[in-house]
Amino acid sequence: MEEARRFFDDTGECVFCRMIHDEMNIGERVVAANEHFVAFVLYAASSPFHAWILPRRHFSSFRVISDEEISSLAAIVRDVLRRIFYGLNDPAYNLVVRTSPVKELGSVYFHAYMAVIPRLSRHAGFELGSGVSINPTIPEACAAFLRDVIIP
Ligand SMILES: [Zn+2]
């Protein structure tokens, strides 16, 4: 949230809205998109296939999501998880909900999102010793792989 605030102070923009705009324009890391949400593998993903799902409309808390957006969110979460299930052979994963604290409900700089983090790799000596993650995959290749998964 500190970095999001700093970006907003420097540019007058929500960094997450900027990411959505840039990712949709580039398209290489996008996994799925629908009317209200976009899912993409992060440019600097800390682990293989680490993806975020963000609402196209700026809001900082899922408390203000509309009924229509909830349906859209459910559809894209299901779509991304099915791609991971069938494409990566049903790995363990974490689904993380990032939403602003109650005192920041109307935040202009924080943007609610979900992170999908398949657990495909383990931290070894380097990661444990340095606190730095090594991701041996290329985010654009991960996104292309997930886009190409055939869901039965
Ligand atoms: Zn935003």
Image (tube, helix red, strand yellow):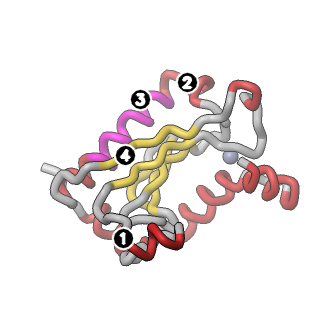
Residue corresponding to mark 2? 66
Q: Name the spot of residue 89 as percent of width and height, x first.
A: 16, 57
SS majority, magenta: helix
Q: Tag 2: residue type?
A: Ser
* Marks 1, 3: nearer the viewer: 1
Disc 4: residue Cβ within 8 A of ligand 1's nearest atom = no
Residue 10 placement (x, y as % from top left): 87, 60
Pick whichever of labels 1 and 3 is earlier in the sequence: 3
User: Is residue 98 something one can see in this rendering?
Assistant: yes
In depth, the one of 148 and 89 nearer the eye is 89
Quick one: label 1, few (<14), some, or many (20+) residues within 10 Å? few
Query: What is the quadrant of residue 21 in the picture?
Result: bottom right
In space, the residues marked 2 and 1 are separated at their CA atoms by 42 Å
The residue that label 4 is drawn on is 94
Q: Which residues are magenta?
A: 69-81
Q: Is residue 128 above or below residue 36?
A: below
Between 151 and 9, the one lying in front of the other is 9
What secondary structure is found at the residue carrying circle 4? strand
In primary-sequence order, the first of circles 3 and 2 is 2
| Relative vertical location of residue 142 with respect to residue 87 in this rendering, above or below | below
